[in-house]
């Protein structure tokens, strides 16, 4: 069984190290996993980033073909965050 929160942590650390110049973004992996991320201070004093992540989750959940959320994590220092989803077309 895959620990998707651990996979999200690895992705957040990778994004911090290799995609830091991208403030926010998303990309799909060949296995149907969609990565949504931000380099914008998730664990900082300003709670706007946390609210934005909740809006992303909420908006995606309301879609007719909503992707399945698999995991969420921040990088080691809490600045970058990463959500992992399974694309609706790749479920079951």
Image (cartoon, helix red, strand yellow):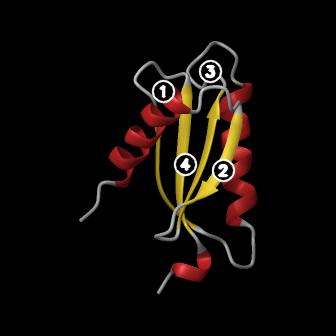
Chain-order first, disc 1 or disc 4: 1
Figure check: 62 above or below 82: below
Q: CA distance from mark 1 to mark 4?
A: 17 Å
* Pointers 2 and 1 in contact (C-beta within 8 Å): no
* Pointers 3 and 2 in contact (C-beta within 8 Å): no
Chain-order first, disc 2 or disc 1: 1
Q: Is residue 43 left or right of residue 65?
A: left
Residue corresponding to mark 1: 17
Q: Which mark is residue 41?
A: 3
Residue plotted at (64% across, 35% down): 38
Secondary structure category for the residue under label 1: helix
Chain-order first, disc 4 or disc 2: 2
Residue plotted at (52% across, 62% down): 29
Residue corresponding to mark 2: 26
Q: Which mark is residue 83?
A: 4
Taking depth in this image into account, of 10 and 45 the one nearest to the observer is 10
């Amino acid at each position: 069984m895959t620990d998707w929160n651990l996979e999200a942590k690895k992705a957040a650390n990778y994004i911090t190290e290799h995609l830091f110049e991208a403030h926010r973004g998303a990309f799909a992996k060949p296995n149907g996993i969609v990565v949504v991320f931000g380099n914008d201070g998730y664990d900082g004093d300003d709670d706007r980033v946390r609210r934005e992540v909740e809006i992303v989750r909420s908006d995606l959940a309301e879609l007719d073909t909503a992707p399945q959320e698999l995991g969420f994590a921040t990088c080691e220092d809490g600045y970058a965050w990463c959500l992992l989803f399974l694309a609706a077309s790749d479920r079951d």
